[in-house]
Image (cartoon, helix red, strand yellow):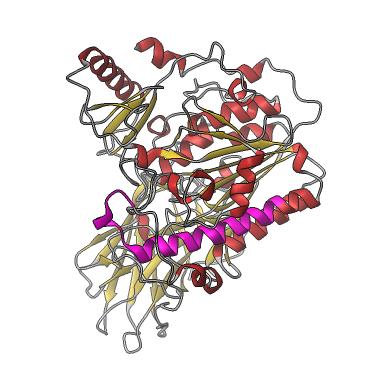
Amino acid sequence: MKLLLALGLLTHASLFAAAPAQRPNIVVILADDQGWGDLGYLGNKDARTPNIDRFAKQSVSFDRFYVQPVCAPTRAEFLTGRYHPRSGVHGVSTGAERMNPDERTIADAFRAAGYATGAFGKWHNGSQWPYHPNARGFTEFYGFTSGHWGEYYDAPLEHNGQPVRGRGYIADDFTDHAIAFIEQNRAKPFLCYLAFNTPHSPYCVPAEYWAHFKDAPITQRGADGAGETLDVTRVVHAMNEALDANVGRLLARLDALQLADDTIVIYFSDNGPAGFRWLGGMRGKKGTTDEGGVREPFLLRWGKRFPAGTTVREIAGAIDLLPTLTSLAGIPRAGDRPLDGRDLTPLLRGNTAGWPERLIFSSQQNRTSARDQKYHFDFQGRLYDLATDPGQTKNLANAQPDVAARFRTAVADWRRDTRTILTEDDTRPFPAGYREFPRTWLPARDGVAHGGVKRSANAPNSSYFVNWTSPADRITWDVEIATTGDYEVALLSTCRTGDEGAEIELTHGATRSTGRVASAWDPPLITNQDTIPRPAAESIMKDFHPLSLGIAHFEKGRAPLTLRATNVPGKSVMDLRGVTLTLLPENSSAQKP
C-alpha cells in the first residue's frame, strides 16, 4: 500500500517534454457547490444546461473525478497539485482556508513561462498578501477572496486589492471580466481561471431563469426525499442555467476570436451539493467524504487533439490538473516539492495500457476516506464495492478483511504524511504591511469577538460584527506587521441614527489610533436580492461606509490588533464589516493626526 501512496508522488513528466509548436491557452471554469447530478449530460432531466451538455460532447469526460468535500481544500489542490493539508488548508474560514506562502501554484508556473494569468470570481485561499491571488501567480484578479459572498447584484468586490463595485448579476460580471481578459491577451498565451460562486447560497438568480423553475415539478428527487427542499432544488437549477449561459458566452467568444482550437478548456465543480437532491443514487452531499460529496463532473477539450465525446473510466482528481496542464503546455511546474497528482495525458489520448493503480484520498475535519478503481473505504472503516454498489449500501469490511486492512494502513500513512498543520492549533497570524501590496483588508471573518459582540450570523464568511454596546467589548485580530511605517487606518462600518458620537481606539503593540463616529450611516438590509429566503446561518448584508481613524505609525512585529470603544453615548457603537490598514509610501507627507 505504501507503494500505491508513492505512485501519487511521480516525477513530473513535463520537465522532459517538448513544448507544443504553439503553447495552448488555458481556461479553467469552476462551479461552486454544483453536484454531479446537476447537469443534463449526466442524466438530470430537470436541468437546463444546454451549453455544458454540448461542451461535454466536444470533450473528454471523466466518469470518476474526485475533489474534496468543501470549497477551499479543492481549490488549493487544483492550484498546487498537492493534497490540501500539505499547504495548510484545513477549513473554509477564519484563516483555515489559506495556502501557505511557500507553496507554488499553477499560476506561478504559467506566469514564469510567459503566460498572462488572470483569476475571476471566488478565490477562497487567503485574503491578505502573501495569501492573496496577486501573490500566487495571478497578475490580474477580480472578485472576492472569501468563502462565500452575501451580495449577488452590483456586489462590492475587489480588483487587484482595491475595492470596486461590480455590475449586474455576479456570475455575469465575473464572465464579462474573464472574457475581457481573454480579448486583451488573445495575441499571447493566457491562463484564465473563472471561478464562479454559484450555485452556492444565498439563492439569488435573475427572474428570467427563476421563471423556468418557480412552479416546475421536480421529477428526479434526492435519495433522502424527506431531506430535500424542493424550492432550493428549483432555484439551484435556475442558478445552474444562468451559469450555463455564461459558459456558453465564454465558449462562443473563444470561437469568435478563433481561439477555440488553441485553447484547453476545463470544466468541473469544487464539491457536492449543499443540500439533498438527485445524485444518480449516490450517497452523501457537500461536507461528506461519500461519493455524493466528492465525485464531480469533469470535462476537458483541446480543439480536436483528443477524442471528443469519450469517457475516461480511471479515477482522477483535482490534484491532477497542475501536472496535466503544465505537461500539455510543455512547461515546467514551479517549485520542486513532490506532487500528489498525475499527468492525465495518456488517459486523455485513450491510452490506458500500463496506467498504474492508485488511491485517491478525501478528508474533511479529520474524517478521511480512500478510493481505488474498485473500492471506497470510508472514514468509519466501512468498505464498499463502487463497481457494483455506487450507493454504498453493503459494507464489505467483514467479508473482505484483507482489503479493509490494506486501506486502513493506507489511510493512516496518508494522514501522517500530509498532516503538516494541526487543525486545532492553527497559529498563523494575519499579515499586513507589504510594500508590493500596501492595502490590507482584515474582515470580520478573520476577527474574534469579545464581551457582548457577536457575528451577524453563525457563518463567519461574509459576516459582520454586531451588538457592540459597551467599553468592555472589544474585537481582535492576530496581526503581524511586515513593514515599519505609517498606515492609514479605516473601519468599514454602519451606525444607527441616535448612536453617533462613540469614541474608538485601535491598538497594536505600542501603536494607538483613535477616532470618533461623527455621523450616522444606517442603510437598510439588502432583502430584495434573494429569490428564496437565505439560510439562517448566512448574514443579510447592507452597504457599509469607511470611517477614517487617520494615520498611525506601526512597528514591525506581531501583536493583537484590538478595537474598542472608550466612550459609548448611544445604545451601540457600530456594526463592523472590517478594518483596512494601508501602508503609505516612505516619502509620504501625511502627518499623524
Q: Is residue 585 left or right of residue 277?
A: right
In the picture, which quadrant includes the N terminus? Answer: top left
Q: Which residues are magenta?
A: 222-251
Q: Is residue 356 left or right of residue 473?
A: right
Q: Observer-nearest residue: 112 or 511?
A: 112
Q: Is residue 387 above or below residue 69?
A: above
As for residue 388 lying within the magenta part, the answer is: no
**Residue visible at 43% across and 57% down in the picture:** 200
Q: Position of residue 280 (x, y in %)?
A: 39, 43
Q: Position of residue 468 (x, y in %)?
A: 26, 72
Residue 141 visible in the shown view:
no
Q: Position of residue 18 (x, y in %)?
A: 74, 18
Q: Is residue 253 above or below residue 590?
A: above
Q: Is residue 516 left or right of residue 17?
A: left
Q: Observer-nearest residue: 480 or 192?
A: 192
Q: Position of residue 483 (x, y in %)?
A: 50, 47
